Image (cartoon, helix red, strand yellow):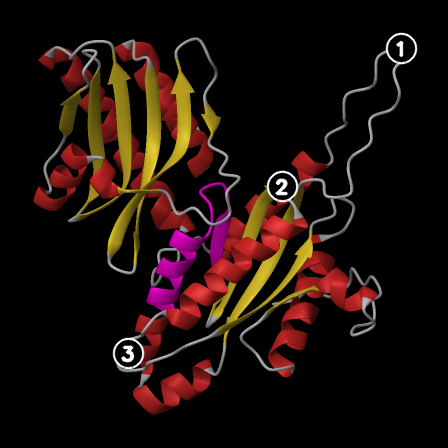
Amino acid sequence: MVDMTGHRDHTMLDISVISAVQELAGASQTRVLTIVSVRGKKFVRSRAIICAGEAARMEDHPDANSVGDPIESFPELNTCIIEQTASATALSHDGRSTLWLPIWIGDKADTCLEIVHNSPYHPDTIQVIGGIVSVYRNFQNLLDYSERDSLTGLLNRKTFDDQLTKMLQASTAEPEAPLPGQPERRQPADENKQWLAVVDVDHFKAVNDKFGHLYGDEVLILIANLMTSSFRSQDRVFRFGGEEFVVLLRSTTLDNAQKIIDRFRTNVESHVFPQVGQVTVSVGFVSISPYESPVNILGRADQALYYAKSHGRNQACHYDQLVSGGMLEAAASNDTAEFF
């Protein structure tokens, strides 16, 4: 409990809760699942996992086009979500038991714990697990209150500063030295990198002016939902304010980053917004260098976004490609200016 409540980070909270459940319940596998809605259908995607004898870790989803498994693949969990019950269980043909515990926030459950054991649990054990889940839910609510944007539920600007700092620190970690007599390791040209993308809603002022701020807010909420379902569980999505959002994409190649961002952009383009109709977004993105200041990284992504908006909108532009193609001039470093 001390370890679980000692963190101020959702990722470490997920790792702590599955580690605690795994140890106390003697499970063979424990996962944190994300439940997302895409065009009226629910999907289940693993966010963190721990297996017996292994360390807990965040799940990596290399397939940029996957939003997870349809919730119908888990009929007992699906019934639990529909009926809004506290738990669901299933027995496999080999006698293994799977227990699902949705994390209910009011009448909504975006997170669920999945616990697999070699045999069904005794009710006393389930009660202990339920106590851990209650602490996890309450502490998650406290983190959300301080870290989330009140309108969209996305992470806020203050949390972005902390997350980007952590990402930069992780990127500067020294690589392992080669063994004596072994050649120096070199990264391939398409190595995994961290990326920052700035998203802006096209013609958002016109939406507010024509339909009113109530529909404008609904557009922002729906776009936030599309961001949650389009990006991977290891990515971080933030609302900066107004109609501007920022995404931190973790550990992927340029090709995958482009696919992930374009998937989100096309999801917005094809979504029908009530009353408003079609809405599009423009995106500027850049790879994150650990040796640059956050101000410069944001500034480059902002330049790529401005290019996208001034050259037709509804597109995603990569800063380095624009510079190499002669469409943008590289910005000089200026650590005395801060972008808002």
- Secondary structure beneath dot 3 equals helix
Residue interval drawn in magenta = 220-239
* Relative image position of residue 87 (x, y in whole percent): 14, 30
As drawn, is 205 to the left or to the right of 103?
A: right
Q: In the displayed image of the protein, which residue is found farthest to the front? A: 93
Q: In the displayed image of the protein, which residue is found farthest to the right? A: 181
- Secondary structure beneath dot 2 equals helix
Going by the numbered disc 3, the residue's amino acid type is Leu
| Disc 3 crowd, CA 10 A, few/some/many (<14, 14-19, 20+) | few
Q: Is residue 146 visible?
A: yes
Mark linked to residue 167: 2
Q: CA distance from mark 1 to mark 2?
A: 31 Å
* Relative image position of residue 258 (x, y in whole percent): 60, 56
Q: In the rendered structure, which disc, 1 or 2, sits on the residue that comes first in sequence? A: 2
Which residue was labeled with disc 1? 180
Q: Is residue 8 visible?
A: no
Magenta-colored stretch includes residue 237: yes
Q: CA distance from mark 3 to mark 1?
A: 65 Å
As drawn, is 212 to the left or to the right of 205?
A: left
**The N terminus - image quarter:** top left
Magenta-colored stretch includes residue 330: no
Question: Which mark lies nearer to you, 1 or 2?
Answer: 1
Question: Which mark lies nearer to you, 3 or 1?
Answer: 1
Going by the numbered disc 1, the residue's amino acid type is Pro
Which residue was labeled with disc 3? 214
**Is 310 located above or below residue 48 in the figure?**
below
Q: In the displayed image of the protein, which residue is found farthest to the bottom? A: 210
